[in-house]
Image (cartoon, rainbow, N blue to C red):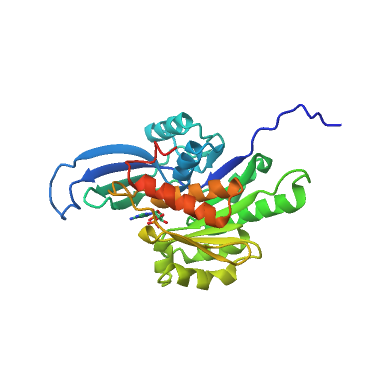
Amino acid sequence: MESDNVLEEPKKILCVGLVCVDLIQICESFPKEDSDQRCLEQRWQRGGNASNNCTVLSQLGAPCEFFGTVSKGVFADYVECDFRDLNISCDNCIVHEGCDFPLSSVIINKENGSRTIIHSNRNLPELTAKDFHKLDLSKYCWIHFEGRRNTSAISAMMRRVVHYNEEERSENQPRVRLSVELEKANRTQLLDLIPLCDVSFVGKDFATSQAYSTMSDTIRLLKPSLSPGSQLVVAWGDRGAMGVSKDGKIVQSIAYTPTEIVDTLGAGDTFVAATIFQLVNGGSLQESITFGCKLAGAKIAIEGLKNLG
Ligand code: ADP
Ligand code: FRU
């Protein structure tokens, strides 16, 4: 008989996707082309959607792990220290030597907190399904995927989780739940991932690039792709968020706009992480998106993604 005394480690939320370094410059106003000026402030920050999701989850007290590819060097060292400072595991990351670390140049306009991102990823390979295969899925309660360019690899990773849930998981273990975020414009192929997930998050940049003009429009057009009992969430900047719950009910939250918008970089990542946190902890979809909007509203009132907890 198995011993009851062995304390099982709490199951983690795994976020799969990008970690990069954000080189941020805060400017008085958005710069004119070909001008030469000083910024008000500058800082580095660990970035990337999945990495940002972990930053938020860990401050909320959720055990979490980041999984993605990294290279070696100063940026990789910085990112690893920063993950460790926040108690975010990154032990399973795939290291590719001799590649450049992904970087983003970000201009934050102090007038309205807008963020303009110029991202570079020269040669760091994306994760493969084989990389994913090495994970012990019994360690996780939820796996969230950032919808990146390697859609067919992500689909294979998700199917691996579905297979684990159906064929390998022991009966006393809960199902590993799956979510995806469709955020970047024009990555139409990501739509194929929706039927595999328990929760699909769609951002306004992706939605508008598909010519969905509002949150309701997005929900109406994507609802038929959901598998039975799964949920859809659409976030739309200062319009808040809307969702379809397991029983097909539409739920909605207003946006919680602070008096001053300081920095909108990572607002969407904060929303997604906070919503997942509530869902993992048994919240209804209505409660979860409301919490997501509240935390995203709190985030845009401060610089960076720390000091949210
Ligand atoms: P991103 O562009 O970072 O993916 P969005 O602009 O879609 O993110 O916003 C995600 C969430 O952040 C929204 O659902 C909302 O709750 C919050 N948010 C973003 N911008 C604002 C804003 N101007 N006022 C209030 N809340 C906002
Ligand atoms: C914000 C973010 C940044 C990163 C960029 C990558 O959502 O993850 O941290 O530079 O998007 O596209």
Q: In the rendered view of the protein, which quadrant contains the N terminus? A: top right
Q: In the rendered view of the protein, which quadrant contains the C terminus? A: top left
Question: In the rendered view, does 63 fall on the left or right side of 256?
Answer: right
Front one among 258 and 58: 258
At 51% from the left and 72% from the top, the residue drawn is 220
At 37% from the left and 58% from the top, the residue drawn is 237
Q: Position of residue 148 (x, y in %)?
A: 48, 55
Question: In the rendered view, does 245 fall on the left or right side of 273?
Answer: right
Question: In the rendered view, does 14 fall on the left or right side of 305?
Answer: right
Q: Position of residue 289 (x, y in %)?
A: 50, 55
Q: Is residue 153 visible?
A: no
Q: Position of residue 67 (x, y in %)?
A: 53, 42
What number of labels is visible?
A: 0
At 47% from the left and 45% from the top, the residue drawn is 53
Front one among 209 and 141: 141
202 lies above or below 306? below
127 lies above or below 91? below
Q: Is residue 22 visible?
A: yes
Q: Quadrant of the rendered structure where residue 80 is? A: top left
Looking at this view, name the residue that lies furthest to the right.
1
Q: Position of residue 68 (x, y in %)?
A: 51, 43
Looking at this view, name the residue that lies furthest to the left.
36
Front one among 299 and 39: 299
